[in-house]
Amino acid sequence: MSEGISTREGIAGLDFSAVTPEQFAKIVKGLSPKEIDEIARDGELRASILKEVFTRMERQFKPESAGSLQALIRWKVTSAKGAEGQEEAVYETAIADGTCTVTEGRSDATPRVTLAMGDADFLKLVSGNQSPVTMFMLRKVKITGDVALAAGLNRYFDIPKP
């Protein structure tokens, strides 16, 4: 894998299932928000990246940190203007009984917290390149519901330190 991947073609050529969380964090760190938005304009590539990120949440979950936490977290990731396909991707993370289960789409259940943000901010957040508290203060993420849970979500997942 090249250290300097910063174009849609370079990202499109990656097998994301073979990229470690640390490598992914480095890739995201090297991209500007504008470059991420450009990559996200390719609806198929965007869907592939989001699916891999959410699939990894289950593997990077730290049950020992979650304890008896019971929570449904809804994620709304909005694509940049001009993007092909779906404008808003919705995923839900259910944490219960020491497990984490991620599903694509919106359920009828009421989430304990909903986080809404754009593609670039989402990738910066989940790759450890941005602090959730800072993002909230800068209004880059909109939180509905349990703000304290949202602020502490990073402690429940093994997020790389870029």
Image: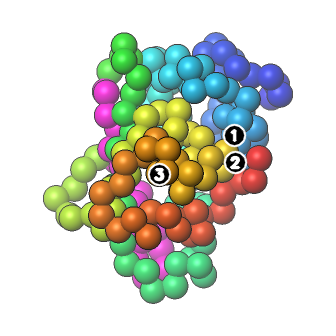
At label 1, the amino acid type is Phe
Give the spatial CA distance, label 3 vs label 2: 23 Å
Quadrant for the N terminus in the image: top right
Q: Which residue is mark 2?
A: 21
Residue 96 painted magenta: yes
Pinpoint residue 147: horizontal percent, then vertical percent. 39, 65
Tell which of 95 and 17 is nearer to you. 95
Is 102 above or below relative to 35?
below
Pinpoint residue 100: horizontal percent, then vertical percent. 46, 67
Tell which of 129 and 98 is nearer to you. 129
Give the spatial CA distance, label 3 vs label 1: 23 Å
Give the spatial CA distance, label 2 vs label 1: 5 Å
Q: What secondary structure is marked by label 1?
A: helix
Tell which of 55 and 22 is nearer to you. 22
Q: Which residue is mark 1?
A: 24
Residue drawn where x is 37% and y is 48% of the image: 142
Callout 3 environment at 10 Å: few (<14), some (14 to 19), or many (20+)? some
Residue 22 painted magenta: no
Q: Are marks 2 and 1 in contact (CB under 8 Å)?
A: yes
Q: Which residue is mark 3?
A: 136
Q: What secondary structure is marked by label 2?
A: helix
At label 3, the amino acid type is Phe
Residue drawn where x is 47% and y is 51% of the image: 136
